[in-house]
Structure formats: structure tokens, C-alpha cells
Amino acid sequence: MMAEQLQQLILDTLDAQSTLPDSRTLKISGQSSPASSHDAQITILGALNSLLSREMITYETHEISSHVLTPEGVQIVREGSHEARVWAALPERGSAPLSAQDLKKAVGDEAAKVGQGRAFKSGWIAKEGNGFVKAVPNITDTTQIELRELESSGTLAAGEKALAELRKRKLIIQRKGQWFTVHKGANFTTSIAKPETDLTVDMLTSGSWKKSTFKKYNFDADGIPTSGGALHPILKVREEIRSIFLEMGFEEMPTGTFVESGFWCFDALFVPQLHPARELQDTFYLSDPSTSLPPPSDYYKRVARVHEHGGYDSIGYRTPWSHEESHKLLLRTHTTASSAAMLYKLAAKCRGEDIDGDLTAKSQLGIANPSHDGFRPAKLFSIDRVFRNETMDATHLAEFHQVEGVVADRNLTLADLIGFMRTFFRKMGMKNLRFKPAYNPYTEPSLEIFAWHSHLEKWVEIGNSGMFRPEMLAPMGFPPDVRVHGWGIGLERPTMIRYGVNNIRTLVGHKTSIENVENSPAVMF
């Protein structure tokens, strides 16, 4: 029956009776029985809601619980229970017994498996030799009788215990249903003409609007949910880490140069020009343009000399210096390149120099407490992207974010660095840390930092740290007693630990869930 026809049937019934006490008594066209089925009541509910929206009717809902037969239950109604079919297939006592294999052929594997046990339990069959025979001349198939009763009436006189047994055998399932009592509404009429939703020019011109019925506006209806922007979990963690740095008195470094020269990315950090990290399989080099502008001349010469010949109590690397290697352009592999440039500016200030007319360097460096030789302690940090030619896996990407920090002061020690690391990571909620000795060309001593990942259930490397070597600091012009702590951590791995992400490729990239980004909570370390 069409929706309009069903609505008309309901209205006509109300017009004749004033009230429809039970929607299950409706006589739907084409059906001889009342509309008592679950699916029919769902259809009726749709018609009632349509009429309710026009205030033509009101209705009350009544909840009911009923049972319906499963496909196996329907089969038992038609063919008998498994145990009854097994009993019927067996010969009388005194005849040749039927073997288990022949019984399966007679009633099927499933019926033989289930029915055999239940028939034995009921005392209907007995075992003789290697086969089975009937133990009683007659049986009453209670299961089939109960299912037939349920099929016809929806209830069972035997009560809840019998129903529970049938549910346990998965022969019936319980289903919630409903029926309705319907009354006339404030705008009751037997016409189902739909009200107008818009006032048109034609209606105004013809005057038909005067006789038209308009749909009532629902000013309490919820509007379409607005979809605003959402910060990615990495950005949330980035902002929290940035707040930690600022709280600890750090100044943020400018790090907008994704493209660096080999000099600032490697040479200034005392990384040898033959180091494996500078090879194509680890670093992305630019092809056009391929070379950089020259760095400050005097500083460049000092760096080249300490690499090739040594100096400052170091023997250097004793390898030929390549100007071509130093001037190559590349995608920076770490933000320490920016740290080196800022430390060079800080050292220049010690000497009273003004690099390239940079009058803002003082404010960028967080300079305070000048000493007699012009050195001013500094605490600097940066959070930005870096690039490495790495094989991607669950914890590595070719492009990721690095959190970098440096502290420059007099007579700093390794104990100061470890203490600072513990304080910093404690503010991030990572209290279970380990430090492992490591090698870095530009720090000595050096430490790798590990944190326990509760979801991966293993120690995950989250950063690297150390004290910058004299071969790096002395060419810049720092006083001999100045020490600089440096450390770097990935931004992605703390984010994975914070949000319980096992695979970094589901955090960044095409596998990222937009829904998870929108619903991810604010980070609070």
C-alpha cells in the first residue's frame, strides 16, 4: 500500500471511530489478516509521523515483546525436530540396528549430530552393537508442537522456561515491537493534501495563497551541524611543547629555511664531508639551483681549517676540504642548521660584531646578563619540518617535525643536560626515560633519549642530545669556558605516545582519519 493510501486509511478510520485503539486492527488493502506484523507496524509508524507533523493526529506508543522462528525453527515446524527425525529413521527394537553412518545418510549430518544426543537424553533411542534402535514405540515431538504454537500466536503457554530453552537452542529469537493508539489532532481532516512549504510569486499573483494551507515552521528544529576546522594532533602537541619551552624561559628561533647549504647543515656542525649522512641515500639534494651563496668568509675559513688541519686542541679530520661539497643545496636534515646560524650570531655579539646589519638578532637570541667579555647566556628552541631520505615504516617518515633546543652558558656539564631533559620530559608527561651513550659528530658526550611506549610495549627512541664540541663552538668565536647543550626530539613520536597511535602512517598521510583528527582531544601533558 502506498504511503498516501495508508494515511488516508488512518484518517478515514478515525473519522468513523473517533479513536483507533489498536493499530494492529487496521485492515490493510490486499491483506486478509490485521496489520499485526512487526514490518507492518514500522510502515504504519511512518504514516503516523507524517500526519503528526501536520497536527492532524496524535498517538501513543505501546511496547511489546514477541518471539519469531529462526530458519532452523521453521524447518522443525515443517519436518519435525532433529531428535524426532532421528527416532523416526531408526528400526524397532529387535530389528537390525542402523549404523551411525547410515543414520547420517538418512537424516543429514546436522540432524544426526544434534538429534542423537537429545534423543538419548529423552530415552527415545538405544544403542545395540554398532548401531541404534528405537527404545520406545511412540513419542511426542514437544519441540515441534511448541514452535507451531509460537508461529501461530507469538506466545507459548508453557511459559518462560520453555521459551528460554528454545532460545538457547537458537530456534527462536526475541524481538521488540510496538503498536499505537491514535487520536484526532488539532488540525484533523480527512484530506491528505500536503501543505505548502513556500509562498511563490504565482500564489501571490493568483491569490491562491488565501486558500492554501502552509506547513508550520519548526523553530526548535536543530540546524545542519556546522563543520569547522580542527587542529591535527601533531599541531596540538606542537603548541603544548611550545608552551613548555616558553614557560621555561626559552626564545623561539626563526626556522623558515627548508633549503640549506651543506656548510650550515653539516660543516658548521663539524660533520665530516665524507660522513654517510651526506650521501644521496640519506639526504635530498637540489638539482636546480644546486649551489648556495657563500657563507661569511672568515668563519668559512676557520671551519675549513679545523676540518682539514685541526685546531683548538683538535687534530681535525685530516681530509681534503671540498668547496663543492660545502656549497651544495639540500633539504635540511635537522633544524640544528638553524641553531648553528643563531649560535654564530650569538658569538658575533660577544665580539661586538653586527652581522649583515641584523639589528633584531639581540631580541631573537634572548640575550641577558652581559659579562665582561660580551658573552650573554641564551636559551633557544625551534619546532619545524626536516627531511631525510629514509625507508618509511611504523615509526619513520621521510618528512617529519623536529623539536630543537639549545642552552648556552658558562661551565655547563652533562649532569645539567640530563637534569634538564628529565624536567622537560616530565612536563610532557613522560616520566619513564632512559639515556644511552651515543655518537654524534658535533656533540661529545652524546646521549640518545628513550621513552616507554605502553601501546607498543617497548622502548622507543624519542630524541638525541649532547654537548656541542669545541671544534664547532670555537670557530664561531665563543669564549673557552662557554658550553652549549643541544638536543632534538621528533614531534611525531611523542604524539603517537600521547594518542596511542601504533603506526605513524595513520597519523600523517593519506591513511589519516579525518574523523579522528576532528574528535581527538586537546593534549594536556
Image: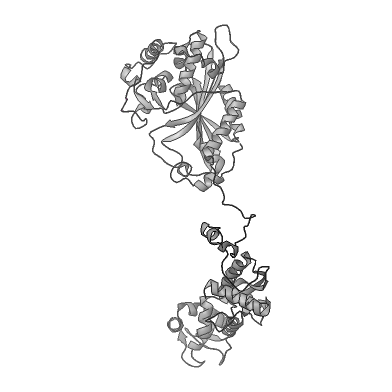
Q: How is the image coloured?
A: one colour
Give the position of the C terminus as an image quadrant. top right
In the image, is residue 406 above or below residue 14? above
In the image, is residue 439 above or below residue 234? above
Which segment is the magenta one?
Answer: 284-295
Q: Residue furthest top?
A: 372
In the image, is residue 190 above or below residue 356? below
Whether residue 213 is visible to the viewer of this picture, yes or no, is no
In the image, is residue 147 above or below residue 410? below
Residue at x 51% of width, y 37% of height: 493
Whether residue 273 is visible to the viewer of this picture, yes or no, is yes
Residue 82: x percent and y percent?
52, 81
Q: Quadrant of residue 380?
A: top right
Give the camera-side residue of 286 and 477: 286
Q: Is residue 227 magenta?
A: no
Q: Quadrant of residue 209?
A: bottom right
Magenta: main secondary structure equals loop
Q: Quadrant of residue 173?
A: bottom right
Residue 494: x percent and y percent?
53, 37
Residue at x 44% of width, y 13% of height: 356
Residue at x 50% of width, y 46% of height: 514
Residue 512: x percent and y percent?
47, 45
Residue 254: x percent and y percent?
49, 23
